[in-house]
Every structure is written in C-alpha cells, then in structure tokens.
Amino acid sequence: MRWPAEATAWMDQMGAAKDLAGSQMAATGARLKGLADLATTNPGPVGGAAQGAIGAGRAALANQFSNAPACIVVTPYQAGIGQGSGGHQRFLSAPNLLLQLANKLTDSTDAARPQGQLYGLVVLFLSTRLDHFAATLQRFNSLLPMPDLVRAERRARHLSKLEVEKWVIPAAGQAPRWGQLPLQRCPITKVASQAMSGQLAMLESYAADSSPMADLANLQARKQAQSAAADQKLAELQAQLANSSSDVSMQTRLIGPGDGATIRRRLLEGDAPGHEWPLCAGALLVGSLDGLGFVRELVGL
C-alpha cells in the first residue's frame, strides 16, 4: 500500500498560491496594526431603537409559551383503550373516546392530574377508515405534534399500506448484485479526503478575500435577504392557516371554567359524535384561558 501520488498530483498546483497567501497574510497583519489608531466605527441607530421592541417581544414570547397547559391523549392503539381482536385491527368510537377523556379528569391515581378552576379544550379526530384517520392526524401533527398522536398516525398509515400491499408478491433478482465501491467507508480514503478538502478549503478562503467595502455590501445584502425570508415564512404560515377550510373529521370544543368534575360533566353533555365514527382519537388540554390561548386560536375557537 502506498500514497496515490499520480492521482493526487493536482495538489502540487496549490503550492504557489499557498506561498503567496502566506506572505499576504503577514502584510495584512502589519497594515491592521497601523490602522488601529486611525480607524473608528460608528454603530447605527437601529440597535438602540430596537432594544425596547426586543425586550417587549421576548417577554411576550416567554409569557405565551411558558404557561403550557396539561394534556392527555387517547388513541385506539394504547394499551387497554381500543376495542377489537388481534394486534392490528383496533377501534375506538367517538362516545367511548369522550368517556375515556372524561374519566381521566377524575383519575385519582394520576398524580399529574390538573387541579383547581381551569378550562378544558378538547380536540377530536373522527374517521371511518385507516387512510383517512392517518391523513387527519397528519394535518394536525404538522402544526402541533403530540407523541401519542404521531405514533397513532404512523401506525394507521402503516396498517393502511399493509391492507393494500398484502396481496402483492415481491420479486427478487438473482444474487449477488452490482453495487458501488464503498470508498467513503475506507479509513485511508477518509483521511486522504479530509486532508485534501482542508487544503482546498484554505485556498477557497484566500480566493474569497475582498475589500472591506465589498464585505460590508455583502453583509448588508445577506441581512436584507434574511429579513425578507423571515417575513415571507411568517406570511406563508399565516396565509396557510387563514385559508384553511373546515374539516368535519376534526372537532374542537372549549369547556369551563370549572374543576375536574365540572369539566367532566360538561364534556359528556350536549351534542357529540356518535358510534358512526368507529376510528377516533382525541386530546384534552386543561389550563388557564391565557395558557390555552395559542392552541385555542390555532384550532379555530
């Protein structure tokens, strides 16, 4: 085993540029020392003017998300919750889902059960088919993912795919098969690639050298582009939520104020979806009205 000198002969072309860069760096250091007592900087007025807005914004953001409500999630795939035979076909109708959520409000064995005069926000996901169930959960999880709902979405999608593909007979080719030489996993190629990449990166940093005016112009352009991108991202998110249509497979309801027993009684009262929805999941959030404000507006209440 020996170093591939012929394959890496192109690295010899970098010698002259590296020597020139070294001499220029020494000269640049001397010039900077000479400018230390001559150059001055004058920060613009934006920083001082933005301090008040920054402080108020940080305080509002911390207050918005620091008072998180308590949350309980019920899905058909949790142990002892869903009905059905076997490990795959599990069902949970809407009335049974509401009963499971209501019982958790008065579960004395759960030390994390919320106490006091609070509000309850219930979100129900109703479906009759596995693919529709997964699609409904995906729309909610894309904005407000909860671990149990994410697992239920993943399982429903895989079960729906299994129902479609279980009749497909796979075809296997003759082994062994052609593949690519795994150069990137060889120790010598890893070390050689890192060393050569470092040499190229150093030369690229020299080639990117520019004047201070050009650097300031590039910095201004990057800041302007970042500001525009941030505004555009927020505008797109607001437009997406503003133009969303009503979804019959997702129902929400705000209950309260009251203690756990009061919220439980009101949750089981009134009009509610029936057993025509055999595949359901739900989430119950309990907290103060301010703590529920962000999620309450997010679901359209």
Image (spheres, grey):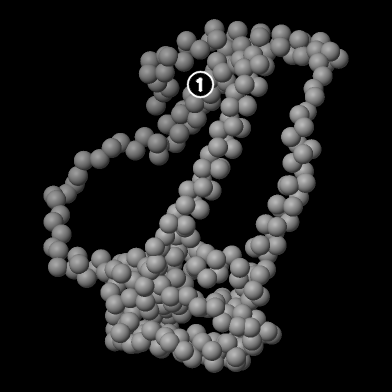
Q: Name the one closer to the observer, 179 or 225.
A: 225
Q: Is residue 33 visible?
A: no
Q: Residue at 54% across / 7% down in the picture?
A: 16
Work out which residue is located at the far right of the displayed protein and give it: 37
Q: Position of residue 64 (x, y in %)?
A: 66, 62
Residue at numbered disc 1:
200
Q: Quadrant of residue 86?
A: bottom left
Note whether residue 6 is visible: yes
Badge 1 marks a residue whose secondary structure is helix
Count of numbered circles in the view: 1
The location of residue 217, given as percent across then percent down, is 62, 21
Q: Residue at x 37, y 18 (%)?
A: 7
Within the image, what quadrant is residue 183 found in?
top left
Which residue occupies 60% across, 23% down? 218
* 209 w.r.t. 102: above or below: above
Q: Is residue 85 left or right of residue 212?
A: left
Instruction: Please name the residue shown 60% across and 92% down the image.
Output: 261
Image quarter of the N terminus: top left
**Residue placed most toward the observer, 236 or 74:** 236
Q: Amino acid at mark 1?
A: Leu
Q: Is residue 109 above or below residue 87?
A: below
* Residue 141 spot, x, y in % from top left: 45, 64
Could you classify mark 1 by the number of other residues whose Cα lies within 10 Å: few (under 14), some (14-19), or many (20 or more)?
some
- The foreground one among 208 and 194 is 208
As drawn, is 77 to the left or to the right of 203?
A: left
Q: Does 218 sit above or below residue 276?
A: above
